[in-house]
Image (spheres, rainbow, N blue to C red):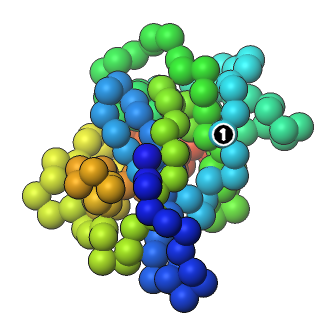
């Protein structure tokens, strides 16, 4: 967990915040500006014609949203398996969806120079899921996930919203 002292207003403009999480034993970071909440995932209704990484629809806050399994998105060959009971509600480009994850660890703040594009880092299939890397306080590098790519592009192409509504 981040052990830095609270930052002043001037420092906030030069820092970027990330929600840190784990999936299948690996650590990841999500830009915090797209995170709306973390919640226990209740009943999920299957969505016909949805890509395999979309496990269905949930209604945690009175409005239906697609639920994406991070495990299936990172490893499509996993197929059907028990889904995490924890989810992160994300809003990106006016699209709201939930990301089912193994666990959420906390928030880290990184100076703008503390993260970078991920040259030479193996991007999971499909490519483009990683934005770059962020350095954690312990010195480790955590891959930064691109939230919209988790939802919008399926291995078969097209966007999820149009596939579910057909």
Q: Is residue 108 above or below residue 79?
A: below
- In the image, 24 versus 161, the foreground residue is 24
Residue 25, quarter of picture: top left
The residue sitting at 38% across, 74% down in the picture is 111
Residue 85, quarter of picture: top right
Identify the image quadrant of the C terminus.
top right
Q: Is residue 69 left or right of residue 36?
A: left
Q: Is residue 98 above or below residue 100?
A: below
Residue 78 visible, this angle: yes
Identify the element where label 1 is drawn: strand
Residue 141: x percent and y percent?
24, 53
The residue sitting at 69% across, 52% down in the picture is 36
**Circle 1 residues within 10 Å: few <14, some 14–19, many ≥20:** some
Residue 118: x percent and y percent?
21, 62
Residue 56: x percent and y percent?
64, 26
The residue sitting at 35% across, 51% down in the picture is 129
Q: Residue furthest bottom?
A: 10
Q: Is residue 131 above or below residue 77?
A: below
Residue 131: x percent and y percent?
34, 61
Residue 153 visible, this angle: no
Residue identified by numbered label 1 = 38
Q: Residue furthest right?
A: 62
Residue 146, quarter of picture: bottom left
- In the image, 122 versus 143, the foreground residue is 143
Q: Residue furthest front?
A: 5
Q: Is residue 94 above or below residue 60?
A: below
- In the image, 157 versus 71, the foreground residue is 71
The residue sitting at 16% across, 53% down in the picture is 121
């Amino acid at each position: 967990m981040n052990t830095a002292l609270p930052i002043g207003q001037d420092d906030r403009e030069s820092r970027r915040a990330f929600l840190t999480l784990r999936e299948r034993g690996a650590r990841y970071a999500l830009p915090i500006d797209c995170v709306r909440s973390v919640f226990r995932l209740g009943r999920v209704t299957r969505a016909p014609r949805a890509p395999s990484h979309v496990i269905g629809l949930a209604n945690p806050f009175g409005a239906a949203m697609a639920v994406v399994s991070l495990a299936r998105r990172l490893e499509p060959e996993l197929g059907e398996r028990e889904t995490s009971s924890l989810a992160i509600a994300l809003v990106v480009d006016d699209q709201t969806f939930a990301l089912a994850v193994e666990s959420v660890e906390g928030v880290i703040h990184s100076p703008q120079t503390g993260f970078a594009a991920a040259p030479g880092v193996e991007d999971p299939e499909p490519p483009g899921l990683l934005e770059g890397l962020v350095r954690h306080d312990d010195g480790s590098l955590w891959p930064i996930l691109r939230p919209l790519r988790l939802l919008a592009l399926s291995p078969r192409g097209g966007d999820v919203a149009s596939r579910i509504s057909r």
